[in-house]
Amino acid sequence: MADIVVLESRERVLAGILFTAAAYFLFSAQDASIKLLVAGMTVWQIMFFRSITVLLACSAIGGKRLFADTIASPIVRPMLVRSAFTLAAWLCYYNAARSLQLAELTTIYYAAPIIVTVLSVLILGETVPLLRWIAVFIGFAGVFIACDPTRLGFSVPVLLVLAAAVLWGIAVVLLRKTAMQERTMIQLVLNNFYFLLFSALPALIWWRTPDATQLLLLLSVGALGGVAQYMLFEGMKRAPVSIVAPFEYTPRWSGPSRWATPSGATCRARKCSWARR
């Protein structure tokens, strides 16, 4: 019986790893579409469209019952806090993108898995063995070498990216707590409802009517973002965050975001963006 329990636990963790790795890959694919969109519209408008697309899909799948269950869910407030941390991370990252190159942004931002691992111990009480710490630091070292950042210095943009990494780390840890309390579809509805609220006014103020190509890209962002969020929530249910944290490095090696921007290209606010979770 003990062997069966251990086997089920291992299979559950493995499933969590696969879900999370797939989620980060899809987020990376989403980034490639967003890089094309931000040249002609604001991040607020992209977030607004993505949220509406995901909510419409949830409505088609779950119907009125899903939204009724969401209203009565015990994680309504915790998800609001988690969404606020995610939004703050976005804002810090996008402001830093005005001044830093893509390689520099990537290298600094990928301190997030280290922060997630530390917070998993402090907030969730997880036990992180030495091999897991080594995996996190090896992943960061690999990204650092691949990006080869130079002349970073100590500036406001650098601090903003570090702040984004810390805020995202907190958001991931909070996600692990909420993921254990409610089913994934309800989390998906709440997450995108809050993003819709946050982005609605700025999107309307700086609205730009999309053409046919942009509309298709917006739909792809919504589809990729929705599936990626679902997989991330499912992954967090199955595996401790300290285990899945290193897999955030995987899109850097194989994701479409690496294809979308030439090596050494400057990442400006209107030319490059990363829309996470």
Image: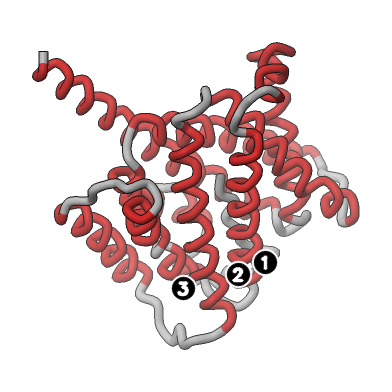
Of the image marks 3 and 2, the number of the one nearer the N terminus: 2
Residue 138 horizontal/vertical position (percent): 23, 61
Which residue appears at 65% of the width and 14% of the height?
Answer: 62
The residue pinned by badge 3 equals 104
Left or right of residue 231, residue 254 in this image: left
Q: Amino acid at mark 2?
A: Ala
Which residue appears at 58% of the width and 37% of the height?
Answer: 225
Do the CB atoms of the residues marked 2 and 1 lie less than 8 Å apart? yes
What kind of element bears circle 1? loop
Q: Amino acid at mark 1?
A: Ala
Left or right of residue 229, residue 251 in this image: left
What kind of element bears circle 2? loop
Q: Nearer the viewer, residue 214 or 188?
A: 188
The residue pinned by badge 1 equals 269
Query: 177 above or below 201?
Result: above
What kind of element bears circle 3? helix
The residue pinned by badge 2 equals 97
Which residue appears at 22% of the width and 57% of the height?
Answer: 133
Residue 147 horizontal/vertical position (percent): 37, 69
Query: 234 above or below 78?
Result: above
Left or right of residue 63, residue 7 in this image: left
